[in-house]
Image (tube, helix red, strand yellow):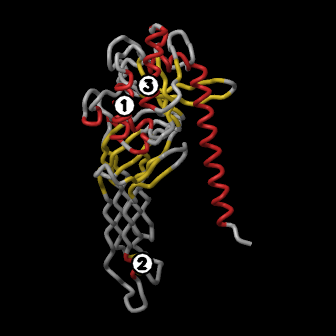
Amino acid sequence: MKFLDQAKVYIKSGSGGGGAVSFLREKFVEFGGPDGGNGGRGGDVIAECADGLNTLIDFRYQQHFRAGTGVHGMGKNRTGADGEDIVLRVPVGTQIFEEDQETLIADFTEVGQRVVLLKGGNGGFGNAYFKTSSNQAPRRANPGQEGTEKGIWLRLKLIADAGLVGQPNAGKSTFLSAVSAAKPKIADYPFTTLHPNLGVVRIAEREFVLADIPGLIEGASEGVGIGDRFLGHIERCGVLIHLIDGTNEDVAHTYQAVRHELAAYADVLADKPEIVVLNKVDALTPEELKDKLKALKKVSKADIRQVSGVTGQGVEQVLFDVLAILDAEKAAIAEAERKQTEEKWTP
């Protein structure tokens, strides 16, 4: 199944049914009069967060969605049936934007969330509605209200606890395959990973979701390489694992180039907690390893983890670091909510 994380669709709500103009005329009914029923209401366009979906591929083959039209009213005070609603089923993590791609309509983070994107038009009143003591035989009825239509953008941002970032061939996919059951494509050429991958990591009776996105190169924010369009998938991550290829000549420049692209995309990524990891240490001599650790520590101002995704060296330590940061963040959120509750409470 192809991964699709962005789609434009066109939606239209149903028009309301028209009211009826009708008069009751029966042989044994002494007093007839107007009996035109109201028209039915048009269907709504609804977006629903559904379980079991992880891509927007369904919206590649169908881009137009139209809700049902309300049925017209009829004689004998019969109201027309309402138009059928149409439901757009989207995966968890989907954001819905107006056509300008900036105005956020909905952000789905939990299964079962529903948002009405467009309301159906109201049905028109039949002539029975307009009957009064001074106008006992009205001959007018309202037409149904027209439905509304517009284009919207669906954008999927995967929900993961931690995200892998780095340049192409830094070993991100190898790392993901080593710590989870995910089977990303792994090869010895740049841009092997062409779309994000997710894996569930289990360690010390705990588990978290790890996301691997395509590599970033210098100028990605301006469209170089695959660009930075996939960075949205790690916006929701609690921590970033920054992998640097230890076989690169200038590891300091490699680190700075990726950090620059993260900051150019969004401040929220630049401010996220980061674990700096020097990968492929099994391919370095002790002297090379010492020099590269020193250079990397100088520019990152962080403790550098030494890892080999192939041999498994140092991998567990990185995973425990991720758990520690996630636990600290959860504790901070819980404390903030507790303080907010105490401030609102009054005797």
Image coordinates of residue 87 in percent, x first then y, are 44, 47
Q: Is residue 326 above or below residue 249?
A: below
Residue 10 in view? yes
Q: Residue at the location (47% across, 15% down)? A: 290
Image coordinates of residue 20 in percent, x first then y, are 35, 70
Q: Mark 2, residues whose alpha carbon is within 10 Å: few (<14), some, or many (≥20)?
A: some
Q: Is residue 42 above or below residue 238?
A: below
Nearer the N terminus, badge 3 or badge 1?
1
Q: Which mark is residue 44?
A: none
SS class, disc 2? helix
Q: Residue at the location (43% across, 59% down)? A: 82
- Please give left or right for residue 149 compared with residue 300 in the image: left
Nearer the N terminus, badge 2 or badge 3?
2
Q: Nearer the viewer, residue 276 or 206?
A: 276
Residue located farthest toward the bottom when viewing the structure as drawn: 134
The amino acid on which the numbered mark 2 sits, given as a three-letter code, is Tyr
Image coordinates of residue 177 in percent, x first then y, are 50, 17
SS class, disc 1? helix
Q: Mark 1, residues whose alpha carbon is within 10 Å: few (<14), some, or many (≥20)?
A: some
Q: Is residue 274 above or below residue 46?
A: above
Q: Which mark is residue 256?
A: 1
Q: Which mark is residue 129?
A: 2
The amino acid on which the numbered mark 3 sits, given as a three-letter code, is Leu
**Residue denoted by label 3:** 296
The quadrant holding residue 13 is bottom left
Please name which of the two marks, 2 or 1, marks the residue nearer to the observer: 1
Q: Nearer the viewer, residue 184 or 172?
A: 172
Gap in angstroms between the C-alphas marked 2 and 3: 79 Å
Please name which of the two marks, 3 or 1, marks the residue nearer to the observer: 3
Q: Nearer the viewer, residue 122 or 149?
A: 149
Please name which of the two marks, 2 or 3, marks the residue nearer to the observer: 3
Gap in angstroms between the C-alphas marked 3 and 1: 10 Å
